[in-house]
Amino acid sequence: MEIQLEQDKKENIILVNQKIKTQEDMANETNFDEKLLNQYQQFYKNDHKKFQIKNLSFIFGSFFVNQTIILMRSNKYNNSIIGLDKCTLENNLILLAIIGINLTYTFFVYWSKRNEEYYKDIVQYRPNQRFFKEKKQFFFYYLGGFLAGFSTGLLGMGGGLIMVTFLLSQKIIAREAAATAAFGSFMISLNSLIQFILQKTITDEQMLVFFILGILGVIIIAKPSYIFMNRFKIGYIILIVDIIQVSINVFSIFALIIINTILYGFDAMLNYYSHC
């Protein structure tokens, strides 16, 4: 397989990537007609776009659908946007709606991307990169994303570490694995931010402090780690960064428990206040 050296101008680093054949290459090596060559060229152009509109539409479409359904449900912090009372059966059935709609949305995305890969097979475009055609591989990645989201939602940590581990196990480039996990964390954080704004559970000053801590974390830990990884070609540094992040989260949770115990004793843990 031919190797193409591409210069990363932003960080002045040489990256080695699998070469993608151009339309001219395919015309010389195959007997494709003009229609197939144009289809190949379209895939080539889409892959080199800075913003993948179709993929971003799938991602943000899922986010907005889920966020809308969540806002339809009442809880002790905010009211339903459709007027449901938090003590009714309909309000609890919203949870089942989230599961059903997510499964439907997943099937739609899977069907769309799988058909796209079938067309790529016809024109022999990057035959070694197939993620939806093989069901076993697709559901492996899907399981990784589910466990990452479940861990983050339930424990408030561990999503990035789980996703990076799943991707690295499939020999995905460490930098791409980290970027994928970071994007997932960004979407979860965006959901939390919207909830904080609507529920007003923290003040603007507290939110500003968390933003500052996040920026400092990127400057002090994440960015130097990526530079170190690229300079010395050490991919496992990503796992170290995620382990550090999880350790900090564990420390913060224990600190929160200690502070609440000092301020409120064990009343909040021993007493249950019904809201219905």
Image (cartoon, grey):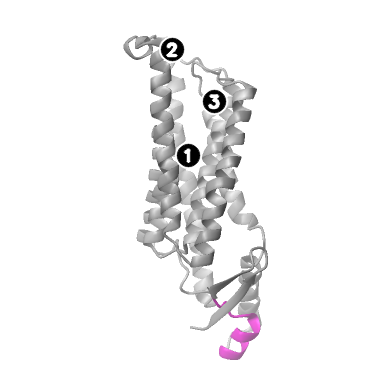
In the image, 174 versus 209, the foreground residue is 209
How far apart marks 3 and 2 lie (CA) works out to: 34 Å
In the image, 72 versus 244, the foreground residue is 244
Q: Secondary structure at mark 1?
A: helix
Viewer can see residue 5: yes
**Count of numbered circles on the image:** 3
Screen quadrant of the C terminus = top left
Residue 212 vertical position relative to residue 135 in the rendered view, above or below: above
Earlier along the polypeptide chain: callout 1 or callout 3?
A: 3
Whole-percent x, y for residue 121 in the image: 49, 74
Q: Secondary structure at mark 3?
A: loop
Numbered disc in front, either 1 or 2? 2
User: Please, what is the three-letter code of the amino acid marked with disc 1?
Assistant: Ile
Viewer can see residue 145: no
Earlier along the polypeptide chain: callout 1 or callout 2?
A: 1
Q: Secondary structure at mark 2?
A: helix
Q: Which residue is disc 2 drawn over? A: 263
Residue 171 vertical position relative to residue 150 in the rendered view, above or below: below
Which residue of the protein is positioned furthest toward the left in this rendering? 270
Q: Is residue 22 magenta?
A: yes
Q: Which residue is disc 3 drawn over? A: 72
Q: Which residue is disc 1 drawn over? A: 101
